[in-house]
Amino acid sequence: MGRTIAARILDAIPTLWLVLTLVFVAMRMLPGDPAIAILGEKASLEQLNAFRERMGLNLPLWLQYLHFLRDAVTLNFGKSFQSSFTVSELVRLNLPYTIQLTLASTVIGTVISIPLGVMAAVRRDTMADDLSRVFSLVGYAVPDFFLAAILLVVFALDLGWFPINGGGEGFVDTLWHLALPAIALGLIKAAFVSRLTRSSLLEVLGFDYVRTARAKGAEEPRVIYRHALRNALLPVVTGLGLSILSTLSGSVAVELIFGRPGVGSMLIGAIEARDYPVIEAGVVVFAIFVVLVNLAMDLIYTAIDPRVGAA
């Protein structure tokens, strides 16, 4: 297990370096001057030059790049261009909201998708299967930001059942603010994973060992959940991993729609202001998320089928 974790982390290092390099280059290629974006067009030349010197923007690009890599390795990105907070403080304030949204939507998607996929596979070509397919098709067709906007308008603005914006204070209030964004992302996730669960379980139900278990008189729930579903879970875990990663990107739009704090909304504000340190820190956070999700998927694979870890 320890070797697996170490190997996956080592494999991720070149990917992280490439992502960071692309972000650095992209930020420097964007039109606009960070000094003007922060201080405004009425700032004097002396003020602009002082700002560039203070933030290291007057250094050669290769030296800025080395400083950027150093900051990424040490996770110390200095101070934000546009606020009095350090970048570490901004990440610390916003990251919990993104983690909450990712975990809550994953739980909602998993609780809905796997039972729905199992029901559709067991009751193939029945009304239950047809309804499951309709749910999946609608989920594929509707973007998460569109569903989020509908939920906001109907349940927050019109009915007033949920808060319109913010992240909440205290446990109950936080859950109340989290509900609609998590449902929006969770339903989209469920549409994808339920279809994957159905297809994978249908394939496994046709295997010889399943027919043998039935021939020996095993009860149907035991055949489904003990013999078939366990072996059908590997592709489902892959689908969950992919959906979690898509949730990270979808959370950006959902956080903006619900006026919710988070790394995504922090990144959008930083991009508008050309706040390089915050942008770079946000990308590092998302890249670390990707590495951790892939590592978790590998560990779950090994727990489901030990042969994966031995391969």
Image (cartoon, rainbow, N blue to C red):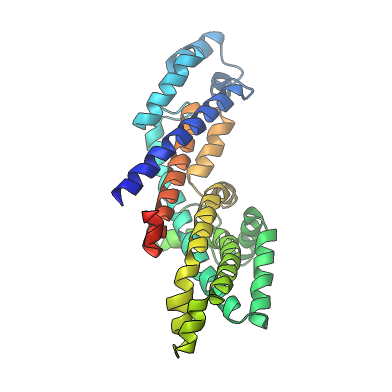
> Residue 142 in the image: x percent, y percent?
68, 59
Quarter of the image for residue 284 reads top left
Q: How many marks?
A: 0
Q: Residue at x 58, y 73 (%)?
A: 202
On screen, residue 284 above or below 147: above
> Residue 236 in the image: x percent, y percent?
51, 63
Q: Mark yes or no: residue 168 visible.
A: no
> Residue 61 in the image: x percent, y percent?
51, 15
Q: Residue at x 56, y 29 (%)?
A: 273
On screen, residue 266 above or below 45: below
> Residue 158 in the image: x percent, y percent?
64, 64
On screen, residue 275 above or below 42: below
Quarter of the image for residue 218 reads bottom left
Q: Is residue 88 left or right of residue 270?
A: left
Q: Mark yes or no: residue 54 visible.
A: yes
Q: Residue furthest top?
A: 46
Q: Is residue 138 left or right of residue 292?
A: right
